[in-house]
């Protein structure tokens, strides 16, 4: 019991004793789980937006490089035309 930081409290007549640190924490546990799940969801959304942004910037960088290499805006116009097709 000492490894987890709990120690046995005095016996209250029922012969069992109570571990200090134990109790009815069902509402606290639910609240903690809810907060952890909300924070995890927010971090997941944040990471997904970052990944989408990185992919978008890479695509724009490739278009800019092709435009500079060809000396025209034809690659950009081609991508816009392809994006408008259903």
Image (cartoon, grey):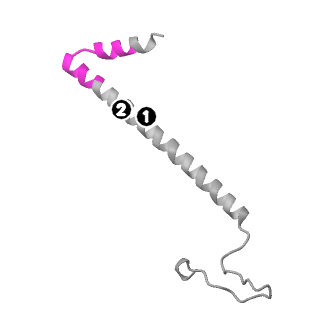
Instruction: Answer with left or right where residue 12 lies relative to residue 5.
Output: right
| Residue on which the image places disc 1 | 52
Q: Nearer the viewer, residue 77 or 4?
A: 4
Can you say whether 24 is above or below 71 in the image? below
- The main secondary structure of the magenta stretch is helix
As drawn, 9 above or below 42: below
Question: In this rendering, is residue 30 above or below 77?
Answer: below
For the point 48% across and 10% down, the residue is: 86
Q: Residue furthest front?
A: 15
Q: What stretch is highlighted in magenta?
A: 63-80
Q: In this view, does 43 lie above or below 49?
A: below
Please name the residue that numbered disc 2 is placed on: 57
Residue 18: image x %, image y %?
71, 81
Q: What x and y, as percent, mark residue 85?
A: 45, 10
Q: Position of residue 43 (x, y in %)?
A: 51, 48
Badge 1 crowding class, 10 Å Cα cut-off, few under 14, some 14 to 19, many 20 or more, is few
Where residue 65 sits, quadrant-wise, is top left
Q: Does the magenta stretch include residue 71?
A: yes
Task: Identify the element where label 1 is drawn.
Answer: helix
């Amino acid at each position: 019991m000492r490894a987890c930081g709990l120690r046995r409290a005095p016996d209250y007549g029922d012969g069992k004793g109570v571990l200090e640190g134990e109790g009815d924490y069902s509402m606290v546990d639910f609240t903690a789980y809810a907060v952890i799940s909300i924070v995890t969801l927010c971090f997941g959304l944040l990471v997904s937006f970052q990944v989408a942004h990185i992919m978008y910037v890479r695509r724009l960088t490739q278009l800019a490089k092709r435009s500079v290499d060809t000396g025209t805006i034809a690659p950009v116009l081609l991508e816009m035309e392809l994006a408008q097709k259903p």
